[in-house]
Amino acid sequence: MARDTTRPHAAARWLETSRGVLSYTELAPLLAERVLRVQQRLETGTHAAHALDDELLLQLHGEFCGDLVPEWAGRWRTIAVRVGQHEPPAPHLVPMLIRDYGLNLQARLTSRPSDPDLLPEHLAYAEGRFLTIHPFRDFNGRLIRLWLWEILRRLNLPPLDLVPTQPQDTATYLAALQAYDDNQPQPLITLWQQRLNQLS
């Protein structure tokens, strides 16, 4: 089964790619190069005119991993997956759930000018809800970082460090994601408040 790269497991993972069967250790630098290229394009406003919707998510996923996994890059997952203790929605529900997610996200973000105190909640929704749905077969963690960078750019905020580097920070982050999966958004909202406080 595919596993979300934001929630690692102890066992080695392997993936069939256009370059043969690669371990995730071998695949990581290839993905990092491609994610960086897409991030650099986002910073220039390449997708500024595109709505924050399901079509843009598909496009971004295809942009950074399409040459490595062409059979399923830029396509919603068609398999059931398990991410740690979380069972994301069945694959046939993904297109509808992500379409609703995009519409909800756009509505939330357009409310920011009149209620900026809700920004941590909106950004927690942008991250947590996407990862709860887990719409792609793999690389959801990498995609959500690109997605969040684009959202922050549109909000005229600088890029934030979204990847924990210390073990205790990683544990806190993963616990917040697990809580969001369990319909408890406050830990991830608090984490976003802390992230945004770094800007002041």
Image: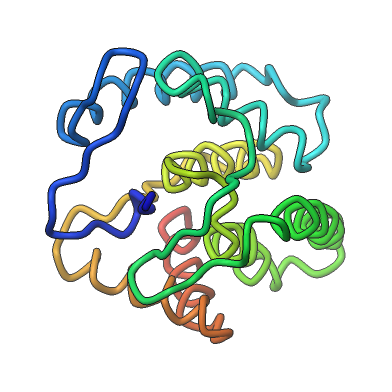
Q: Give the left or right position of residue 148, taking residue 200 as reference.
A: right
Look at 54% across and 30% down and name the residue there: 72
Q: Is residue 106 left or right of residue 185?
A: right
Total labels: the figure holds 0
Q: Is residue 148 above or below residue 134?
A: above
Residue name at image x 59 percent, y 50 percent:
135
Q: Which residue is located at x 14 percent, y 64 percent?
A: 167
**In the rendered image of this protein, does residue 51 appear above or below residue 140?**
above
On the picture, is 196 further left or further right than 97? left
Residue at image position (18%, 33%) is 23
In the depicted structure, whether residue 180 falls above or below residue 153: below
Image quadrant where residue 82 sits: bottom left
Q: How is the image coloured?
A: rainbow
Pinpoint residue 197: horizontal percent, then vertical percent. Answer: 46, 64
Rendering coords of residue 193 (x, y %) = 50, 70
Q: Looking at the picture, how far across and down is residue 101, in whole percent?
A: 75, 58
Residue 1 lies, in percent from the top left, at: 37, 53
Residue nearer the viewer, 119 or 167: 167
Q: In which quarter of the image is residue 127?
A: bottom right
**Does residue 191 lie above or below 146 as drawn?**
below
